[in-house]
């Protein structure tokens, strides 16, 4: 068993390793104390049980026990390629990308909390009425915001690539996933996944451009400009982060950057859960005596 799979097992503690797992590593691994220390320093906590539930649902179907179609797929070198694309893609790549989103989100929360702790007790009444002091050089926040956006999109890319692997199609972009699903629409798996993608389409506009005039925040950062996370505005009445990629406190949007990104995380988790459940159920139904998908994508 790979250690990275082992350490991704869901738990609720904020520490990276459960105490029992840490004790097991210390007892059974050479230089066990050092191994645990490195993991606690350089690792991140696994997905929560709620975040992990969809992955577990698929894992139970694929390996408890392994269905005949999957055994057949692994029987040839060509089939092994698609097997690894599917299994490694979902249980390693997608989960790791989702953890990266959580990591950068946590850093953003910590930065906002530190700023709030400093400013909440400051006397800002010396600022004249109707005047604002805009604070620049908040690059830590911007660097983490960019990383959050990239990790969010990367999660969608990895999921697309992995699930397209079941359909024996190459797909390295969430933008192209719909084309793959359309080409394989004779498969109930493709049809059901397309319904879910359509349901969430508008909510992913900040990381997926629509191909017309709409440019996503992700594409702006990647190809056009250094997009801000926002600017701290200080007035005699208080302070808040305004504007940026999330257009905070503009066009009706209020709240903190963390609150905006936490809502995006809820959307991502809902999407992953629904995709994993629909994929599992559709694959189970499709392989009750049915042939495996062909390798032609028709793109």
Image (cartoon, rainbow, N blue to C red):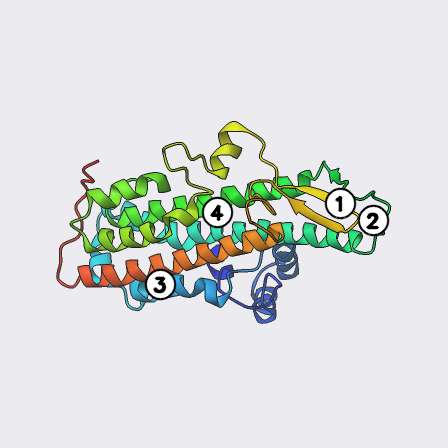
Quarter of the image where one finds residue 178: top left
As drawn, the label of residue 59 is 3
Q: Mark 2: few, some, or many residues within 10 Å (few <14, many ≥20)?
A: some
Q: Sequence-wise, which precedes: disc 3 or disc 2?
A: 3
Establish if 177 lies above or below 71: above
Q: Please state the horizontal and vertical placement of residue 233, each as a whole percent of the image.
A: 72, 43
Q: Sequence-wise, which precedes: disc 3 or disc 4?
A: 3
Residue lying farthest to the bottom in this orientation: 20
Q: Please state the horizontal and vertical placement of residue 4, each as a whole percent of the image.
A: 49, 55
Residue at the spot 46% in from the left edge and 62% down from the top edge? 51
Badge 1 vs badge 2, beta-carbon distance below 8 Å? yes
Whole-angstrom CA distance, mark 3 to mark 4, is 22 Å
Q: Sequence-wise, which precedes: disc 4 or disc 1?
A: 4
Establish if 268 lies above or below 142: below
Q: Quick one: quadrant of the C terminus?
A: top left
Whole-angstrom CA distance, mark 3 to mark 2, is 55 Å
Q: Sequence-wise, which precedes: disc 1 or disc 3?
A: 3
Q: Which residue is mark 1?
A: 234
Q: Mark 4: few, some, or many residues within 10 Å (few <14, many ≥20)?
A: many
Q: Which residue is mark 2?
A: 124
Residue at the spot 33% in from the left edge and 50% down from the top edge? 197
């Amino acid at each position: 068993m790979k250690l990275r799979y082992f350490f991704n097992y869901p738990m609720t503690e904020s520490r990276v390793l459960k105490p029992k797992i840490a004790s097991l590593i210390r007892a059974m691994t050479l230089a066990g104390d050092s191994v645990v220390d490195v993991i606690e320093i350089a690792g991140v906590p696994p997905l929560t049980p709620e975040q992990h539930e969809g992955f577990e649902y698929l894992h139970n179907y694929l390996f408890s026990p392994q269905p005949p179609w999957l055994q057949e797929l692994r029987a040839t070198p060509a089939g092994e390629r698609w097997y690894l694309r599917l299994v490694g893609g979902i249980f390693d790549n997608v989960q790791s990308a989702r953890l990266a989103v959580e990591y950068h989100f946590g850093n953003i929360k910590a930065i906002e909390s530190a700023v709030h702790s400093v400013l909440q007790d400051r006397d800002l009444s010396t600022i004249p009425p109707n005047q604002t002091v805009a604070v620049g050089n908040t690059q830590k926040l911007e660097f983490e915001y960019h990383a959050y956006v990239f990790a969010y999109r990367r999660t969608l890319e990895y999921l697309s690539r992995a699930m397209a692997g079941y359909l024996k199609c190459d797909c390295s972009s969430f933008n192209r996933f719909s084309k793959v699903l359309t080409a394989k629409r004779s498969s109930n798996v493709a049809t059901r996944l397309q319904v879910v993608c359509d349901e969430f389409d508008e909510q992913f506009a900040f990381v997926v451009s629509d191909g017309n005039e709409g440019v996503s925040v992700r594409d702006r950062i990647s190809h056009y400009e250094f997009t801000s996370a926002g600017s701290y505005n200080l007035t005699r009445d208080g302070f808040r982060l305004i504007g940026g990629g999330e257009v905070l406190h503009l066009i009706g949007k209020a709240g903190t950057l963390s609150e905006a990104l936490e809502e995006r995380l809820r959307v991502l988790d809902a999407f992953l859960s629904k995709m994993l459940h629909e994929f599992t159920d559709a694959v189970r139904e499709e392989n009750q005596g049915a042939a495996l998908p062909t390798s032609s994508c028709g793109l």
